[in-house]
Amino acid sequence: MPDQLDLMQGTLDMLILKAVSLGPLHGYGVLLRIQQISGEQLAIQQGSLYPALFRLEHQGVIASEWGESENKRKAKFYRLTAAGRKQLRAETEKWNRMAELMAGILSTTPEEI
Amino acid sequence: MLLAKLRSYVDSLLHRSRREDEIADELQFHVESRAADLERNGRGGLTHAEALRQARVEFGGVETHRADIRASLGLRWMDELGVDLRYAWRMLGRSKGFTAVAVGSLALGIGANTIIFSLAKGVLLDRLTVPHPEQLRQIAIDAGGDKSRAHSFWGSWDDVDGKTQATLMTYPIYRLMAQQNREHPVVEDIFAFKDLGQFDRLTATVDGHAHVVTGQMVSGNYYGQLGVRPQIGRSIEPVDDGTAGTGNVVMISDGMWARVFGRSPDVVGKTMLLNLVPMTIVGVNPPGFTGASAVQIEPDVFFPLSMQPVLVPMTMDNKHHPSVLDNTELWWVQTMARAKPGVSAATAQAAMTTWLDQDVKATMKAEKDTVNPTVSVLDGSQGIREANREFSTQLYVLATLTGLVLLLACANLANLLLARSAARQREMAVRLALGASRGRVLRQVLTESLLLSSLGGAAGLALGYAGRNVIPHMYTAPWQAGSLHADFDWAICAFTVAVSILTGVLFGVVPAWQATRTQVNAGLKDAAASATRRRKGLTGRGLVVIQIALSMLLVVGAGLFVATLRNLSKEHLGFDPQNILLFSVQAPAARYPSPKDVQLYERIEERLGRMPGVTGVTLSREAVLAGGASNLPFIPTDQPKRNGHDGIAWVQDVGRDFFGVYRMPLLYGRNFSSADTSTSQPLVIVNEALVRSFWPHENPIGKTVKMDRNDARIFEVAGIVADAKYSQLNGKVPPTAYRLYNQMDQERDMTFEVKTPLPPSDVLPRIRAAVAEIDRDVPVRDVRTQEAQIAATISQQRTFAVLTGAFGVLALVLACIGIYGLMAYDVARRTNEIGIRIALGARAGQMLRMVLHEVSWMAVVGIGAGLAASLLLTKYVKSMLYGLTATDPWILAGAGAILLTVALLAGWGPARRASRVQPMEALRHE
């Protein structure tokens, strides 16, 4: 497997929102899903996950409730709220714009100046 | 998002332990899930224990994550606050002496401010207890100066810009204006009342018991316009205020209902005698209702204005005509109205001035060269506020002084804390080295200060509550009812809390700032000297200079007020006040129409004169030095009119033995004697001031005068008596004319003066029995000695002298502590330096002088600053001083000398310690 990339500052929130938007998950599940949809190419610090989850819940973009996991254990499940959906859309748009802009700048050739 | 955050906060706070458990469970679940996955998918088959261990390692430190989670939840500040508070509490517990001094001085400062604030709030801010008091307006008149058409008043007035302003109308004019307003309204219906105050109290007889009560006369629409409903029964209505002499209904106050009737519900319909006139009680005022005149004082009885001729008869021109309801010359009734929405005060004022002009022309006789009064519409939300203007000044002064005392306590504390924080350099350096941000350190030190100030504030609140009536009590005389009382409510608590926080920040910010400027390297080293020493020294000295300046200001203030009191007390009275017992008697008009009232007093005078132990009895219309006065035009028959208007003399109707009892020397002519009766020539005895004013170059004995244009009698000047104070201690003795009361037709109430060497407790019961024998229904009121009466007239000055004196002493103590603390710390810090100096040859005496030199230059600068401040500020209290200027050089010099002495005394201890330093010890002490 090629070397994993480290997460960029501030992107963990977006990843969590995206992961949860695909269906309610508990904390471990969020970790697994991010790894899954990133094709195992992102290195995520396990410990920083929970502070981020709690922060997002504090802000009201995700909501939690206790339920049963696959192996019948008690676990806390997170799902996206309406506010969260809105924020995910906005952040995604911003990210895409930024990426496009950066790509454009970085591909400037000397002739275009 | 904000709402969600708030909800999350509250949830975290309320369900703290449940949250913690949930977090623990969640993290546990995560680790176990990872371990299960590792077990299942791990290379080379990990055991359960190994998988668990790996999962834990991957996860990282649980405690750190939990701390991060709490930070995400926004709970970090709460955790830190809790830690800081616990730490601060431990630190304070370790130095109990410092804590006691700090909390004590804060409690005094904050407590004093709370007391003054509650008083100020009551006097300046509290409004009448009626619905929408802000709508009420006083309808006052501006009666110009000497040339005013309005010159006969019953009531009190203010001097505004040299003109007389008073909320007083003649009754006929009030009726006319009310009618004019009904036709073309500029305000809601005008209502009228007259607060009878302390000077016109009534005797209420309930079930045979006589009580002295205060009263307010009201118009029929008074209760309706004020919007006040009775607790029980009904209120006074327009139908009650009809023909003069009718309307025998009365409403009593809640206080009187409790005191006299024990809140019995069958008070409604009961008959009560008011000045021996039967009145029916129709209702009880709601609690807290104090009438329309003042917020602080609750009159006991309210009755219709129509009853004035019967209950409060005033024979102005004609002894057979007690009514002033049809008197067109006397301005006496107080008028107010609610503002009409949409009509500005200026419009109302203009309209009413026009009406007043018309009404004056219609009702009053024309007089040449006079100016009609105009109307001023004033705010009425606090009632008539008669005493308030003067009292406001006093309150401002007291508030400023207590503020200064608090500032002083803060400066003191800041200095003490600075010294303590210097000793904690090490601790601060360690904190910074361990990773605390400077903001965090600042927060911690400030928390300590706020804890201290909160403790002081709580103690101050308790002190303020306990002492809330101290100042009102100092102001009112013990025999006067209806004293001021200050309410203690939430606004005052809020004020105390705000002041505590402000104080904490004020004295805490300097040490906190210093703490954050710790150099980590230097702090961790062992060296006693540090790079910031120079600057710290200056801050400490600066604070002490401020303290001395504030103390100087307070001591100067104390000096001024104490000197004022002394000057007043030493005023030459012109009479001997010793051993004279005073009490007043009112002959109820129902039983004693004139001239029977005068005969009653004669009977009492004669009876008391026969009493064993009594060496002299007399009476007077106005009690001496009680603040009450009456004056009349004084027209010598042989003098043409002076300057177009008549001269005035202050009048005292007295008994034959007045000058004997008071030991006032008769200078010329003769005294009143038993030959002077109601049928002989009316006499008047004048004082020197009057002679100087009216007959400066002639002998007045035998000359005749008329007093008051409407009194046909001619008085003959029988003698000249030496000047003596009349109604107040300050100022010159006014021209006074003494008449014999036996020659008067009517006297509503008189003050008896009984000279006796026996103690009052001995004589008083016999006096009461003697008067009761003559008439059971005439009570003996307001018993006090003449000396107590004089003391009461200067109660304000005495209150101020006591308070400012206390503040001055407090200021000196605080300054003393401050200087001692600073110099002691300084000397301790410089032990090294002093040791070297001595080792190099300096003598002990030189070290002593060095320290004292420090102290004295700080004191000089402080005294100078305080002097400058005094010169600037004392002019505001000029009106409260007597016998000295606001910049009296003796007082300023004296204050400076006291402060310098105190400063040197405070510095003496540390100075001696400096001179006693042993060089070997000092050099060893690194």
Image (cartoon, coloured by chain):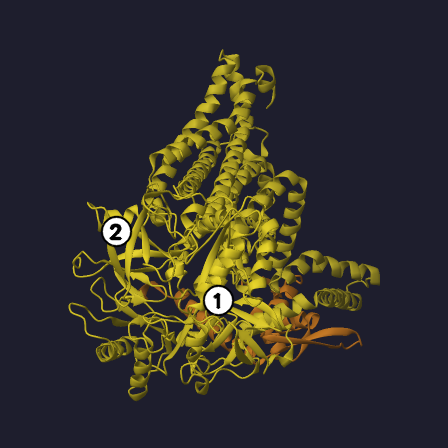
Chain colours: A orange, B yellow
Amino acid carrying mark 1 in the image:
Ala
Taking the spot 63% from the left edge, 74% from the top edge, the residue there is: B263
Q: Chain of mark 2?
A: B
| Image x and y of residue B485, in percent | 53, 61
**On the image, numbered disc 2 is attached to which residue?**
B702
Which of the 4 image quadrants contains residue B166? bottom left
Q: Quadrant of the N terminus of chain B?
A: bottom right
Residue B679 visible? The answer is yes
Residue B647: percent from the left, percent from the top?
A: 23, 57
Crowd tier of the residue under label 1, counting other residues whose Cα lies within 10 Å: few below 14, some 14–19, many 20 or above:
many
Taking the image as shown, residue B681 lies to the left or right of residue B260, namely left
Q: Amino acid at mark 2?
A: Gly
* Contact (Cβ within 8 Å) of mark 2 with mark 1: no
Residue occupying image coordinates x 40% and y 85%: B243
Label 2 packing within 10 angstroms: few (<14), some (14-19), many (20+):
some
- Mark 1 lies on a secondary structure that is loop
Counting from the top left corner in percent of width and height, residue B734 is at 31, 50
Q: Answer with the quarter of the image where residue B191 lies.
A: bottom left
Q: Which residue is mark 1?
A: B587
